[in-house]
């Protein structure tokens, strides 16, 4: 316990050290101020310029904050409450450049002009009028129309008049996408506009220029200023907008951020002051309503929307909220690590792995909280972020559960409850076992092989009850009836038509025909050939009166039929060699209705076989656990059955298991609540995480894929609401964890070559859509008919492609990924991450397509691959023969010779 606590404490300390080490702090020239000018829009976090009218008190409070930092302010409109600004600004000694908002609404344009001129006439602190803001850039007016407006205002204005446009518009640069004629017109008209204004008000915002990183922003701004001076010698040049956003997405090489904003602005203002450049900083306060400017539109303020300064103008530059986020991350990492202390028999290696994962998740939660707290959301973004977070939280806990399995298998102690071989039998202990074999339309030869294997059991006291239900064709049941008669009185044959309750009904009927002195019931499927020592080895476990079930794993004898069957068999092996062994330590395994021994009294106490679900075996096993019985598991194979004939049959089997699992969850969920005492905390945890890991992971994966597909047009064509990296990176991280989980656990617990492991991966991923459909069906439907899994090679592959909808999903995801990458002209990294997520989400669907395509091709046959290997071997150059002395066999000790002979 002390070593585990020390490990947890050490990891938390390392986590804290990493936050301290990664803290960014940058030395930047101090700026003592004041700023020459700063843009001012008096709207708070929940106000919009087209709806809300700022009050005089609100403006006065804002200017109280601005006055110590700036000598002047620039507005962008002169109506809608902004006509109050010059008068209040005069109280603080602030000069004002009054803006006239010019748009398509001519009536409003007229009101704006009249109000601005009146303000200039009545307030001596108004130093200029700015007619329109990027009117040419937004194509609200033509050059000629804007020139006429400027001249008109100049005729009646008592102060200088200009218009605000980007530096390239003033230089007549239309852009590479423009036609030659449009470019010529731009080049001709720009000088005329420059001639019409009293001074040039140029917007220089390097963030919007490709290749303009924060390190180059100031140099670019000064370079553009010099270009304007050369183009218009003798004309007063004002950089009317310069700034850098503190949040949002990158634009090419331009990265927004608080430290970047502070660095750029402090460097620029210091350089501008030294060079004598007249400038205006955009802007005083963040404006969350600016969603039309993309993700960065809201974040140009030097104060946030709550009127808190984002950075200091002197001293080293650092993120002021970094410490709070780090503290929250460390605290959450510590809290998530506390359950490790409650783990019994945890090793230092196990504790280290779990603590690292817990602290990683704590850091993610802290960053998500900081993102939510530090960003402004419109309703659509709130919905997208909230829904994404809701779906990702269970995905994160699924990843944690998988990390826990990796830690337990790779670094934990050996299992204690696992039955690893024959159990010692008390003197004379041989309780009677009744073996039940339900069968529905099963091939007679297959069922005969099962019965013959039962007859060979090396156990003195057993009977066998065969129940064939709802199979009226005598070709199925008559040969079995005759075979049971030939095998002797131990074998009972029951044929029942119109039997309700599916397989559970057949097992209830088998119980009714069970000998009164049989105290143990064994259940095997009709395709299982059991080993002679099955009962002899495992029945002794029931000498403990608390044992209700002894479960042996499923395995299959036809895994070598085809490449697809090989993949299926290896996928099943993972569950029985990994998950079942882990859950057995908490007495919480999944009971499955073959190779299963049950105490008859425990069956009766649990109410017998129920038809409430189509997975009656797991339902009964969980009910027994709720009644306090012990279940033991062995991973030794005591029998081999048959795999599903086709990929379609494989999917139908998995659908039945998943649908039945969801039925069981709906039936038993109350027993997983904290107030229930019928299961231990460890059992509740195993079943809750087990269902979340199996049903939840697949369903969430499909749900997120569908939601991401719906988001593709938004990302590709509107460029808004791009999923942030805090939502996409966890999906990529979960994929990495899942991959490591599969590879590591298979290498440690399932002894198969790498090629076979790849096949198991394909098989496991191929049923994601199937499991998600089953869970979706379980939400809306209470029950579905029990379907027999086609086995024994009697079913031929149907004409329909068994992965049609998986193909549709894969195609849509890959097309969506390509579309968002192609349309990502500004090279936003979050868009590329989003595309990577779409590709990863397509993998399960591609796996299903792969198996479906292989199934009907020659690549599914082992003979084909053997012929390929033979041809490759023949094509390789053969070494020249070397004469060697005849080899002599070593003389072995007598006790080793028989082993070598074998």
Image (spheres, grey):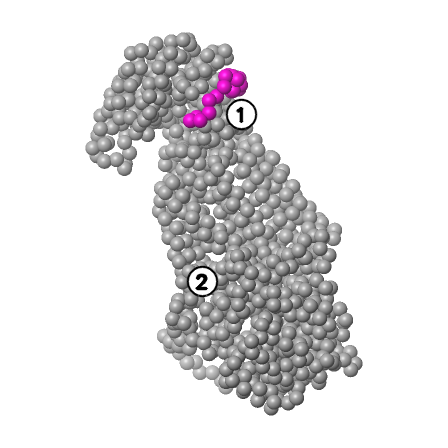
Density class for disc 1 (Cα within 10 Å; few <14, some 14-19, many ≥20) is: some
Q: Is residue 72 visible?
A: no
Q: Tell me where residue 161 appears, x and y as whole percent.
A: 33, 15
Please state if 509 lies on the left or on the right of 146 as rendered: right
Density class for disc 2 (Cα within 10 Å; few <14, some 14-19, many ≥20) is: many
Please state if 244 lies on the left or on the right of 469 as rendered: left
Q: Tell me where residue 197 appears, x and y as whole percent.
A: 30, 17
Q: Secondary structure at mark 1?
A: loop
Q: Residue furthest front?
A: 498
Q: Which residue is mark 1?
A: 307
Q: Which residue is mark 2?
A: 847
Residue 219 lies, with reference to residue 451, above or below; the image says above
Q: Residue furthest bottom?
A: 486
Residue at x 58%, y 57% (from the top left corner): 693
Residue at x 42%, y 66% (from the top left corner): 802
Which badge, 1 or 2, is on the more N-terminal residue? 1
In this picture, which residue range is highlighted in magenta?
A: 49-67
Quarter of the image where the C terminus is located: bottom right
Residue at x 45%, y 30% (from the top left corner): 289
Q: Tell me where residue 595 appears, x and y as whole percent.
A: 62, 74
Q: Quadrant of residue 892?
A: bottom right
Assess whether residue 54 is covered by the magenta stretch: yes
């Amino acid at each position: 316990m002390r070593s585990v606590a020390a490990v947890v404490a050490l990891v938390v300390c390392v986590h804290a050290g990493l936050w301290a080490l990664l803290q960014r702090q940058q030395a930047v020239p101090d700026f003592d101020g004041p700023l020459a000018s700063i843009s001012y829009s008096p709207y708070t976090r929940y106000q919009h310029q087209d709806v809300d009218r700022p009050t005089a008190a609100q403006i006065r409070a804002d200017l109280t904050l601005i006055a110590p930092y700036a000598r002047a302010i620039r507005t962008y409109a002169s109506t809608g409450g902004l006509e109050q600004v010059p008068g209040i600004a005069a109280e603080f000694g602030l000069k004002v450049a009054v803006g006239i908002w010019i748009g398509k609404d001519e009536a409003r344009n007229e009101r704006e002009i009249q109000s601005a001129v009146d303000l200039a006439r009545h307030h001596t602190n108004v130093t200029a009028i700015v007619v329109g803001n990027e009117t040419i850039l937004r194509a609200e007016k033509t050059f000629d129309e804007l020139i006429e407006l400027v001249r008109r205002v100049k005729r009646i204005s008592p102060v200088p008049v200009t218009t605000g446009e980007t530096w390239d518009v003033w230089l007549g640069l239309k852009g590479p996408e423009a036609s030659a004629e449009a470019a010529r017109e731009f080049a001709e008209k720009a000088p005329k506009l420059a001639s019409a204004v009293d001074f040039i008000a140029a917007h220089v915002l390097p963030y919007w220029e490709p290749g303009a990183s924060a390190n180059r922003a100031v140099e670019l701004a000064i370079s553009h200023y010099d270009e304007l001076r050369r183009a218009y010698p003798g004309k007063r040049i004002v950089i009317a907008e310069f700034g850098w956003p503190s949040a949002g997405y990158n634009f090419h090489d331009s990265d927004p951020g608080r430290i970047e904003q502070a660095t750029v602005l402090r460097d620029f203002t210091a350089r501008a002051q030294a060079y004598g450049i007249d400038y205006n900083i955009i802007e005083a306060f963040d404006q969350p309503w600016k969603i039309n400017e993309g993700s960065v539109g809201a974040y140009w303020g030097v104060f946030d929307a709550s009127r808190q300064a984002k950075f200091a103008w002197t001293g080293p530059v650092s993120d002021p909220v970094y410490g709070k986020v780090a503290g929250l991350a460390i605290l959450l990492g510590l809290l998530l690590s506390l359950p490790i202390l409650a783990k019994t028999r945890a090793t230092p290696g196990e504790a280290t792995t779990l603590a690292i994962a817990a602290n990683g998740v704590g850091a993610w939660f802290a960053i998500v909280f900081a993102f939510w707290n530090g960003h402004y959301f419109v309703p659509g973004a709130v919905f997208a972020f909230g829904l994404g977070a809701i779906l990702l939280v269970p995905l994160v806990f699924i990843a944690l559960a998988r990390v826990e399995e990796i830690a337990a298998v790779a670094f934990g102690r050996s299992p204690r409850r696992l039955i690893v071989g024959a159990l010692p039998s008390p003197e004379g202990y041989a309780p009677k076992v009744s073996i039940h074999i339900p069968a529905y339309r099963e091939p007679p030869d297959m069922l005969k092989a099962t019965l013959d294997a039962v007859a060979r059991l090396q156990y003195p006291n057993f009977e066998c009850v065969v129940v064939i239900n709802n199979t009226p064709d005598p070709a199925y049941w008559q040969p079995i009836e005759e075979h049971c008669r030939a095998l002797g009185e131990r074998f009972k044959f029951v044929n029942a038509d119109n039997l309700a309750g599916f397989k559970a009904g057949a097992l209830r009927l088998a119980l009714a025909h069970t000998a009164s002195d049989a105290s143990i019931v064994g259940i095997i499927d009709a395709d299982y050939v059991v080993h002679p020592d099955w009962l002899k080895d495992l029945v002794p476990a029931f000498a403990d009166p608390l044992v209700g079930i002894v479960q042996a794993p499923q395995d299959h004898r036809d895994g070598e039929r085809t490449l697809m069957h090989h993949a299926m068999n290896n996928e099943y092996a993972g569950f029985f060699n990994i998950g079942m062994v882990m859950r057995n330590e908490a007495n919480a395994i999944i009971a499955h209705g073959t190779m299963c021994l049950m105490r008859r009294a425990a069956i009766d106490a649990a109410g017998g076989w129920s038809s409430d679900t189509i997975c009656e075996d797991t339902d009964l096993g969980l009910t027994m656990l709720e009644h306090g019985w012990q279940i033991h598991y062995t991973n030794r194979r005591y029998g081999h059955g048959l795999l599903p004939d086709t990929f379609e049959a494989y999917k139908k089997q998995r659908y039945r298991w998943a649908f039945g699992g969801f039925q069981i969850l709906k039936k038993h969920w109350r027993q997983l609540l904290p107030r229930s005492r019928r299961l231990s905390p460890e059992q509740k945890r195993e079943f809750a995480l087990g269902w979340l890991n199996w049903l939840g992971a697949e369903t969430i994966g499909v749900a997120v894929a569908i939601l991401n597909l719906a988001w593709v047009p938004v990302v590709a064509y509107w460029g808004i609401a791009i999923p942030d990296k805090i939502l996409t990176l966890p999906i990529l991280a979960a994929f990495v964890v899942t991959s490591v989980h599969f590879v590591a656990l298979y290498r440690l617990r399932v002894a198969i070559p790498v090629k076979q492991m790849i096949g198991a991966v394909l098989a496991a991923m191929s049923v994601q859509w199937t499991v998600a459909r089953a869970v979706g069906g379980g939400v809306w439907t209470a029950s579905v008919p029990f379907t027999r899994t086609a086995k024994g090679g009697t079913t031929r592959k149907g004409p329909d492609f068994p992965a049609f909808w998986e193909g549709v999903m894969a195609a849509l995801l890959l097309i969506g990924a390509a579309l968002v990458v192609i349309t990502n002209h500004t090279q936003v990294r979050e868009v590329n991450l989003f595309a990577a997520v779409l590709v990863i989400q397509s993998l399960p669907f591609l796996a299903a397509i792969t198996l479906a395509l292989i199934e009907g091709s020659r690549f599914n046959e082992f003979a084909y691959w053997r012929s390929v290997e033979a041809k490759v071997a023949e094509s390789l150059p053969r070494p020249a023969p070397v004469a060697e002395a005849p080899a002599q066999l070593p003389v072995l000790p007598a006790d080793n010779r028989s082993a070598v002979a074998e």
